[in-house]
C-alpha cells in the first residue's frame, strides 16, 4: 500500500509541475554552477551544494544547500549551509545511509588563487546537522563520484595541488575511513564525467595538461570502463572503451542509472575552461547539445538526443530520479549561470 501511495504521489506531482510540450522541472532558489549534487531515497530527494552564482567571480561562491523532496511539495527548500567561512567549487557529493557526503573542491581568494581542500562534510538532512568526516587522503576537486552498496562513496580522478590524478579513493560511510582502489590506467584528468551503476564505473573525457608552449589544459578523449569486484570494493578491473558519441568534452554532466543499467552523459564544452567559462586556449566555450549513455548490459554507446533541450556545462553531475535523469543548474549556451533543472526523458 505504501508503494502505491508513493507512486500516485509521484504521478500527481509530475502532472502538476512538468510541462506538456517540453521537459520542465522546478528551478532551484538561485542560479548556481560548479555545484556538487547528490540524491537520497532512491532519487526522490535531490541536493545541490555550494558552487558559484551569476557573477562568476570569487565573491559569488556560495555555501548554500538546496533540497527538493519530489513526493512532498514539489518545491525547493534551503538546507543548513555548509560549515566554513567560504563556499567551494567543483566539490563532489554522494548519498549513502541517509547522509550526504560532501568531498573536496577548491576555494578561491580575492586574488584568484585556487586552493584544493581535503575537507569531508557529512550532512544529516532530517536533523539539519553537519559533521566532519575524515579528510581525503589525496585532496582533489573536479572528480567523478558514485556510490555502491549504500555505503561506499567513490572519488575518481580529479585535480590535486600537483595536477590531475588517476587515483580512485573510497570513503566508507559506516566506518568514516578512506581506502585506495585500483587507479584507472589512463591519462590523469580532471573535469571528467561518469558514474557508477550495477557495480560498474564509466568515465570519459575531462582535461589533461597541454604540451609545452600550448594551452595549460586540453581535452582528453579517453573512455574507461571499470568493473568493481563483488567481494572487494577496492579491486577494479579497468578496460578501455571506444570513443563515445560526439567530440571529447569538458564539464559534461554524468551519472549512473541503476534502474536503466546505464551511465548517462549530457552537455559539456569542447574546450576545457575555468569556473567562469573562460577557455584555457582562448576559444569560445560552446555548450554541446548531445546527450548519450553507455548501456551496461549491451556494452554499447547510445545517442539519446543529438539536440538536447536546454543543454548544460559544469552541472557537476547527473542524478537519477524516478522521472528520469536530471541536471541541477550549471551554465547554459551563452555561459550564463542558471537555476533551471533539466529533466531528460527516459529512453
Image (cartoon, grey):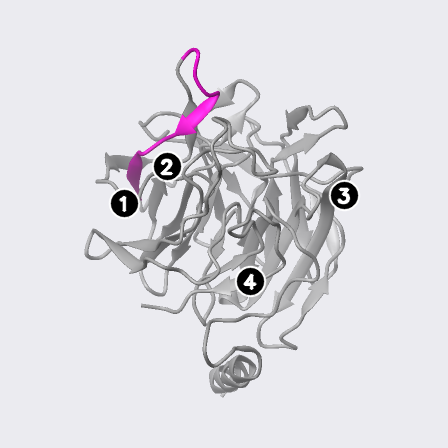
Judging depth in this view, the residue of 69 and 175 nearest the camera is 69
Residue at (57% x, 21% y) in the render: 161
Give the Cα separation between the discs numbered 3 and 2.
32 Å
The first of marks 3 and 4 along the sequence is 3
Which circle's residue, 1 or 3, is located before the other in the chain? 3
Q: Could you tell me how many numbered marks the image carries?
A: 4
**Gap in Å between the C-alphas at discs 1 and 4?**
24 Å
Q: In this figure, which residue is indicated by the disc labeled 4?
A: 341
Is 299 situated above or below 342? above
In the image, residue 282 sits, relative to residue 330, either above or below, namely above
Which residue carries the number 2 mark? Answer: 205
State which tag comes first along the sequence, 2 or 1.
Answer: 2
Residue 125 within the magenta-colored segment of the rendering: no
Provide the residue designation for mark 1. 244
Going from the N terminus, do you reach mark 3 or mark 2 first?
3
- Does the residue at mark 2 contact the one at mark 1 (Cβ under 8 Å)? yes
Q: Is residue 174 left or right of residue 254?
A: right
Other-residue count near label 3 (Cα within 10 Å), few / some / many at <14 / 14–19 / ≥20? few
Residue 239 in the image, given as x and y percentages of width and height: 24, 36
Tell me the number on the disc at residue 83.
3
Answer left or right for 108 relative to 306.
right
Amino acid at each position: 500500500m505504501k508503494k502505491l501511495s508513493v507512486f500516485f504521489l509521484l504521478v500527481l506531482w509530475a502532472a502538476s509541475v512538468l510541462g506538456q510540450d517540453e521537459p520542465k522541472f522546478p528551478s532551484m532558489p538561485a542560479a548556481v554552477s560548479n555545484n556538487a549534487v547528490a540524491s537520497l531515497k532512491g532519487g526522490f530527494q535531490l541536493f545541490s551544494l555550494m558552487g558559484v552564482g551569476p557573477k562568476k567571480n570569487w565573491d559569488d561562491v556560495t555555501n548554500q544547500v538546496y533540497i527538493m523532496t519530489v513526493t512532498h511539495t514539489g518545491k525547493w527548500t534551503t538546507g543548513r549551509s555548509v560549515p566554513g567561512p567560504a563556499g567551494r567549487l567543483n566539490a563532489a557529493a554522494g548519498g549513502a545511509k541517509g547522509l550526504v557526503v560532501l568531498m573536496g573542491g577548491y576555494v578561491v581568494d580575492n586574488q584568484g588563487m585556487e586552493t584544493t581542500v581535503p575537507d569531508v562534510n557529512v550532512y544529516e538532512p532530517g536533523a539539519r546537522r553537519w559533521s566532519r568526516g575524515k579528510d581525503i587522503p589525496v585532496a582533489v576537486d573536479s572528480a567523478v563520484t558514485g556510490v555502491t552498496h549504500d555505503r561506499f562513496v567513490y572519488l575518481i580522478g580529479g585535480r590535486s595541488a600537483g595536477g590531475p590524478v588517476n587515483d580512485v579513493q573510497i570513503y566508507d560511510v559506516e566506518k568514516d575511513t578512506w581506502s585506495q582502489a585500483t587507479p584507472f590506467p589512463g591519462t590523469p584528468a580532471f573535469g571528467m564525467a561518469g558514474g557508477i551503476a550495477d557495480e560498474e564505473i564509466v568515465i570519459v573525457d575531462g582535461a589533461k595538461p597541454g604540451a609545452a608552449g600550448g594551452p595549460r589544459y586540453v581535452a582528453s578523449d579517453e573512455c574507461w570502463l571499470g568493473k568493481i569486484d563483488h567481494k572487494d570494493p577496492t579491486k577494479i578491473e579497468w578496460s578501455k572503451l571506444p570513443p563515445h558519441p560526439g567530440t571529447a568534452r569538458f564539464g559534461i554532466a554524468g551519472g549512473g542509472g541503476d534502474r536503466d543499467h546505464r551511465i548517462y552523459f549530457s552537455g559539456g564544452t569542447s574546450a576545457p575552461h575555468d569556473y567562469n567559462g573562460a577557455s584555457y586556449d582562448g576559444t569560445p566555450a560552446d555548450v554541446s547539445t548531445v546527450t548519450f549513455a553507455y548501456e551496461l548490459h549491451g556494452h554499447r554507446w547510445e545517442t539519446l538526443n543529438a539536440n538536447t533541450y536546454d543543454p548544460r556545462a559544469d552541472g557537476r553531475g547527473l542524478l537519477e530520479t524516478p522521472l528520469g535523469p536530471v541536471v541541477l543548474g550549471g551554465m547554459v549556451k551563452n555561459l550564463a549561470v542558471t537555476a533551471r533543472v533539466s529533466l531528460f526523458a527516459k529512453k
